[in-house]
Image (cartoon, coloured by chain):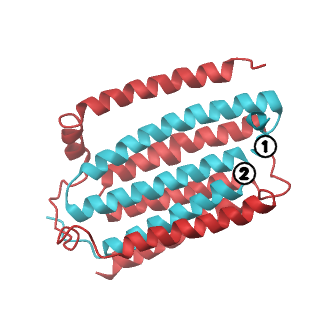
Chain colours: A red, B cyan
């Protein structure tokens, strides 16, 4: 009973710590590695929420593919740390103020009494196949078939766009 | 059957809110376009966590499907965004968003 709570606290702590480090670290490579830490702990949280397929996908797609892309561009461009870390003057103060407003608003939404009566109160027990690749595949290829196919077109467009953008000489 | 989760939903939502806010701070405060991209990924992940937590709460898998699509769109976004970044860097020799001000006149 205590172990899931402990795991949640551990993953949440690692995620928040790595996220703060990512935002305020000077070296971009360290930022990328800290982001990997965040992504891996979120993957752990997915497992706590019985989303095993998404946890695997998180590690493969995010911590694997997307972060490799980031690091690749980082090495390719040879971006060094920014000399002044943050943006100039007014933008910084305004940014932090805006972030506080966003946070208060989110907390207010999360902690407010739920709109849907009874819908949020119970955490139902779920079948053992919940979140497994088979169960997700069954829903994905029946109910969500058209969005899935459109996603493949989107990815194709993204690949072509990336190649065109990286190839062309501007100006 | 898997029993109901020990940690209540609201804890996950608060964690998602915190992570999202850190992402907002990163986007607004940092100057490197690459770090801004990473912060956007952080925000997307916070929302994904929120989706999965709600999905578990309701016992349906629609949230999982939505996270799946968010991941696909994020992959597309990163590919195009980093290509734009490479193009900007090649032209102007900088990845600093304060220095890229062509549209500001």
Output the chain of dot 1: A
Residue A82 image position (x, y, % from top left): 81, 52
In the picture, measured across the screen, residue B48 lies left or right of residue A114, that is: right
Residue A61 image position (x, y, % from top left): 46, 42
Separation of residues labelled 2 and 1 (CA atoms): 8 Å
**Residue A45, image quadrant:** bottom left
**Disc 2 or 1, which lies upstream in sequence?**
2
Q: Is residue A18 visible?
A: no
Look at mark 1 in the image and give the residue it sits on: A79
Residue A69 image position (x, y, % from top left): 60, 38
Quadrant of image for the C terminus of chain A = top right
- Badge 2 vs badge 1, beta-carbon distance below 8 Å: yes
In the picture, measured across the screen, residue B34 lies left or right of residue A138, that is: right
Residue closest to the far right: A83
A52 w.r.t. A60: above or below: below
Question: Is B6 or A162 nearer to us in this picture?
Answer: A162
**Residue A28, labelled with which disc?**
2
Question: Is A108 or B80 nearer to us in this picture?
Answer: A108
A7 w.r.t. A70: above or below: below
Q: Residues within 10 Å of mark 1 (few under 14, many from 20)?
A: some
Q: Secondary structure at mark 2?
A: helix
A145 w.r.t. B5: above or below: above
């Amino acid at each position: 009973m205590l172990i899931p709570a402990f795991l949640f606290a551990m993953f949440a702590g690692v995620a928040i710590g790595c996220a703060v480090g990512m935002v305020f670290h000077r070296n971009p490579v360290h930022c990328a590695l800290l982001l990997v830490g965040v992504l891996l702990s979120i993957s752990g949280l997915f497992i706590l929420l019985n989303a095993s397929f998404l946890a695997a996908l998180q590690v493969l797609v995010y911590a694997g593919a997307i972060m490799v892309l980031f690091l690749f561009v980082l090495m390719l461009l040879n971006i060094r740390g920014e000399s002044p870390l943050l943006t100039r003057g007014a933008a910084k103060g305004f940014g932090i103020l805006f972030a506080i407003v966003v946070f208060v608003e989110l907390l207010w939404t999360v902690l407010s009494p739920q709109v849907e009566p009874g819908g949020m109160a119970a955490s139902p027990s779920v079948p053992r196949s919940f979140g497994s690749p088979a169960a997700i595949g069954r829903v994905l290829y029946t109910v969500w078939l058209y969005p899935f196919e459109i996603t493949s077109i989107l990815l194709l467009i993204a690949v072509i766009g990336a190649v065109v953008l990286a190839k062309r000489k501007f100006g | 059957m898997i029993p109901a989760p020990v940690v209540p939903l609201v804890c996950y939502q608060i964690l998602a809110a915190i992570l999202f806010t850190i992402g907002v701070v990163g986007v607004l405060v940092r100057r490197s376009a690459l770090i801004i991209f990473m912060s956007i990924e952080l925000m997307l992940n916070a929302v994904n966590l929120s989706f999965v937590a709600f999905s578990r709460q309701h016992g349906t898998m629609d949230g999982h499907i939505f996270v799946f699509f968010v991941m696909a769109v994020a992959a597309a976004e990163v590919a195009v965004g980093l290509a734009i970044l490479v193009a900007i860097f090649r032209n102007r020799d900088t990845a600093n968003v304060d220095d890229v001000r062509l549209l500001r006149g």
